Amino acid sequence: MAAISSLLIVLTLSLLVTRVAAMALMLTGLSKEVARFQARSAFTGVGFPARESEEIVNHPIRRRIVMLLMLLGNLGIGAVVATLMVSFLQTSESQYWWLRIIFLASGLIALWLIARNRFIEKHLNRLISKILRRWGDLPRRNYAAILQLEGGFAVSELLVNPKDWVAGKRLAELRLPNEGVLVLGIRRAKDGTFVGTPHGATEVHANDTLIVYGRVESVSDLDKRTFGRRGDEAHREAVLKHSSETGDQSLNDSSKVRDDQTESP
């Protein structure tokens, strides 16, 4: 039983280490999903995409976190394998081998349930964040939390095709904020320049890439919207939906007035 208990303790510590590392990466500005993925990838040594690896390597604090994770991961995985081998060797020689199997399975199930429990995760993340902010040399800005990226919102890239509804129009004409989508920047396809915080007179060109912030569903609908009457109708429906969700009826009223002015001869 001692070998199995040691194995469960090592697994528990491994889960705790990755959770602490993920929270530390989140405090550097990464989203929850990306931080978790990178922490687990570094700990297990499986690696991650080249673009995300650049975000780690080029950031000194993230680089130190990942390097420490790699070191602890090599030690932890080796300990798990060694302990598991000893445990099964002892089990094969024991008369009550089935008790060891049940104990191991029960422990693994318990760890899985604890790791998946949202109540425990919420309070554990708060405790880890508090400790890291108090004793760690980390930036005190969690950009994912500031933008509420975990509540159905996201910062996304939207490639503008020539037949898209937004192509060839100024931002003032699109009135995207009325449907809950904000354009944070535009990457021009012609020369690769980046237009940050564009204003209403900024025109969206075909093949440009929009950096937008809003609900994932709203951005997805905008990405599928084509030019013409159907696109205009989809825009009005999106404005109506957003105004009903926010309780701001003036958004829908102003959209109707502008549409009537556009359609009048």
Image (cartoon, rainbow, N blue to C red):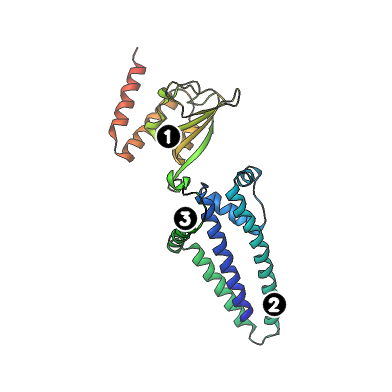
Residue at the (50%, 67%) spot, across then down: 113
Of callouts 3 and 1, which one flags the residue occurring earlier in the amino acid sequence? 3
Q: Is residue 65 left or right of residue 26?
A: right
Q: Residues under labels 3 and 1: Cα distance?
A: 32 Å
Of callouts 1 and 2, which one flags the residue occurring earlier in the amino acid sequence? 2
Q: Amino acid at mark 1?
A: Val
Question: What number of labels is visible?
Answer: 3
Q: Contact, CB < 8 Å: mark 3 with mark 2?
A: no
According to the picture, the residue beneath numbered tag 3 turns out to be 133
Callout 1: helix, strand or loop?
A: strand
**Where's the C terminus, which quadrant?**
top left
Q: Amino acid at mark 3?
A: Arg
Percent of width and height locating residue 217:
45, 40
What's the mark number on residue 258? none
Percent of width and height locating residue 143:
47, 45
Residue at the (67%, 86%) spot, across then down: 94
In the displayed structure, 57 sits above or below 185; it is: below
According to the picture, the residue beneath numbered tag 1 turns out to be 181
Percent of width and height locating residue 47:
66, 52
Q: Residues under labels 3 and 2: Cα distance?
A: 40 Å
Callout 3: helix, strand or loop?
A: helix
Percent of width and height locating residue 114:
49, 66
Tell us which disc is closer to us: 3 or 2.
3
Instruction: Specify few, some or many for label 3: CA neighbours under 10 Å numbering under 14, 14-19, or 20 or more.
Output: some
Answer yes or no: is residue 108 visible: yes
**Where's the N terminus, which quadrant?**
bottom right
According to the picture, the residue beneath numbered tag 2 turns out to be 86
**Quarter of the image where one finds residue 170:** top left
Answer yes or no: is residue 32 visible: no
Residue at the (59%, 25%) spot, across then down: 189
